[in-house]
Image (cartoon, rainbow, N blue to C red):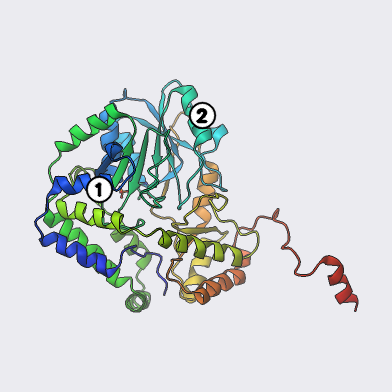
Amino acid sequence: MWMRMRFDIGWPEVLFGVRGMLARLDREAIEQRVCECWPRPEQMFPCLSVRTGFDLLWASLELPAGSEVLMSALTIPDMVRIVEHHALVPVPVDLNTADMGPDADRLRRAITPATRAIVVAHLFGTRLPLEPILKIARQHGLLVIEDCAQAFVGCDYDGHPDADVTMFSFGPIKTITAFGGAVFCVRRPDLLATMQSRHRLYPLQSRWTYLTRFMKYSFLKGLSCRPVCDVIVGVCRGAGLDYDRWINRVARAFPGPRWLEPLRFQPSAPLWAMLEQRLRTFDPAWIAARAARARRLARLIPRGAICPAGDVPDHSHWVFPVLTQDPAAVIAELAKAGFDATQGSSLRVIDPPEDRPQLDPQTTREVLAGMVFLPLYPEMPRHDIQRLADVLHRLEDHLAIDPNVAEPPARFPRVMMVDLRSG
Ligand SMILES: *Cc1c(COP(=O)(O)O)cnc(C)c1O
């Protein structure tokens, strides 16, 4: 089975992490070095997770209660809860299927005198062109926050220079994970200073807490090795257990009702050490290989099949979604062929404020309802990619197909085809 969940970390890095648990480390020096991995260290703000920094951001901004925050309509549930926690009103902006970015017209229409900020999520590995959004934001004096949790492609890129804040995540399922950690680029010095001084008041995460997290994810990494996971999936199926739900639950980093408390810590030294190591040894060729695999698969799947966000030119393909008419059937068939596809159950569509039902993000809802994420990684050999595409061809009736996509160019010029047929 090719699992959907693949931790982007090798065993040597895991060993490095274990060594870090035992070593004497200078926390502040390593924190500084994490910042120095980026082009503008003085603007960088590393913390425990994107959610940690996002919570600090709103706390530091001290916007009046009831202020509205426009958000890409699809994100992880905690991001919405954090905005609400600060007595702000999340307002969804419906996304376009082609780029999974906020639709500019809908964005404009959602702005009211109470709007203060826009949170744009670059989903699935894309880097959206931000200019149209920045232009609208400037006209209305709005803060622009970029969620690049799914869009890390190397420290050379620390976000759009005109965005106010850019956020990168190194959580368990993200590119070059450190099993935790996040780095923000905050381009307003006053805001950065406030966030830093609040952050310094947080208690320190104990080494033990990071160690337990580390062990948990290393264990899961072991389980997601192909032979091991074949056995587990087999046993679960035999026993009628829903391994899909279980995986999604364990992959969530901070579960439970006291969801915000575990976020409000400063990272321990071993986490910094791990993150520094990951950033320093990052190889862009890895992302290039991932994107090349995705482009290959995109060429092989049925023509006209719709891949949400597939039209963005700047795309590192963190995940590979396709739109289907029957996700359950597609997932079941793929599983039979050894491909563990999944629906985006960790993502959530943001509901509009009760008094503005016209802002309901219909397109995003439809995409989330029909979307299936295919397992695809750099180490997947060509013949398995071909096999995956073959399964999708067999399932063509269950896929959402764009009828406007032209026929493939004929292998021979049309005249010659006629000749061949008549001859
Ligand atoms: C993973 C993710 C986050 C949260 O990142 P953490 O570092 O785990 O808090 C936020 N937004 C998006 C779009 C994500 O994919």
Q: Is residue 176 visible to the viewer in this orientation of the structure?
A: yes
Please tell me which residue lies in front, 68 or 50: 50
Q: Residue at x 51, y 29 (%)?
A: 135
Q: Which residue is under mark 2? A: 135
How many marks the image carries: the answer is: 2
Question: In the structure shown, which secondary structural element does the residue marked by tag 2 occupy?
Answer: helix
Furthest-top residue in this view:
113
Mark 2 packing: few (<14 Cα in 10 Å), some, or many (20+)? few
Disc 2/disc 1 C-alpha distance (Å): 32 Å
Q: Residue at x 43, y 59 (%)?
A: 287
Nearer to us in this view, 410 or 60 = 410
Verify CB contact (< 8 Å) between mark 2 and mark 1: no
Q: Nearer the viewer, mark 2 or mark 1?
A: 1
| Mark 1 neighbour class, 10 Å CA radius: few under 14, some 14 to 19, many 20 or more | many
Tell me the quarter of the image containing the N terminus. Answer: bottom left
Q: Amino acid at mark 2?
A: Lys
Residue 194: x %, y % from top left: 23, 29
Instruction: Indicate the position of residue 227 as horizontal and vertical percent values.
Output: 35, 79
Q: Which residue is mark 1?
A: 34
Residue name at image x 49 percent, y 70 percent: 332
The correct choice, above or below, for 59 with respect to 167 in the image is above
- Residue 74 against residue 395 in the figure, above or below: above
